[in-house]
Image (cartoon, helix red, strand yellow):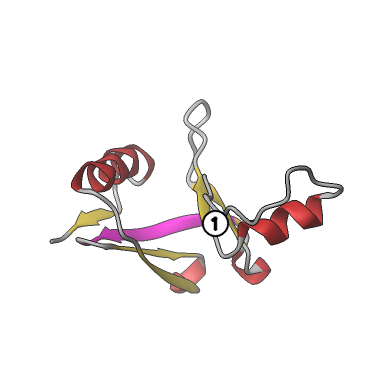
Amino acid sequence: MFDNDLDEPDNYDDIDEVVNSIGPYFLVQFNYEFPGKECHIESDDEHLTGHYIVNSVVIGHRTFTIKYGANDKFVINVEFDATDQERQDLINASKDMFLNVLQITD
């Protein structure tokens, strides 16, 4: 995850300062070495964070929608501005992470 915010401080005194400098984010971690059903999901919104089973992922032309948790407890839609190559990179990574639940639309 990269952030090109030029207003970030050069060094950080504590972890809260680091987290606060990032701004809104949504991160899905998948363990390739020991794959299981659960992913670790992390967000600036703490109630979205935890270990969950991902039920579905839809990648549109400029959107990423993920449903996770029991009975699709969480539905997150992320809009992004990316080049065609960056979108393809997202699709390629998602094919490995979300093998049975991935849908790609245009």
74 left or right of 22 in image = left
Q: Position of residue 30 (x, y in %)?
A: 49, 40
Q: What's the residue at 56%, 65% (across, down)?
A: 24
29 left or right of 100 in image = right
Q: Nearer the viewer, residue 58 or 16?
A: 16
- Local secondary structure at mark 1: strand
Q: Position of residue 43 (x, y in %)?
A: 59, 61
92 magenta-colored = no
User: Which secondary structure is most common in the magenta stretch?
Assistant: strand
- Name the image quarter holding the C terminus: bottom left
Q: Over which residues does the magenta segment extend?
A: 51-60
What is the number of callouts on the image? 1
Q: Nearer the viewer, residue 96 or 77?
A: 77
Residue carrying label 1: 52
Q: Residue furthest left?
A: 106
Q: Would you identify the image quadrant in which residue 42 lies?
A: bottom right
The amino acid at mark 1 is: Tyr
Q: Position of residue 76 (x, y in %)?
A: 43, 70
55 magenta-colored = yes
Is 32 placed above or below 38 here? above
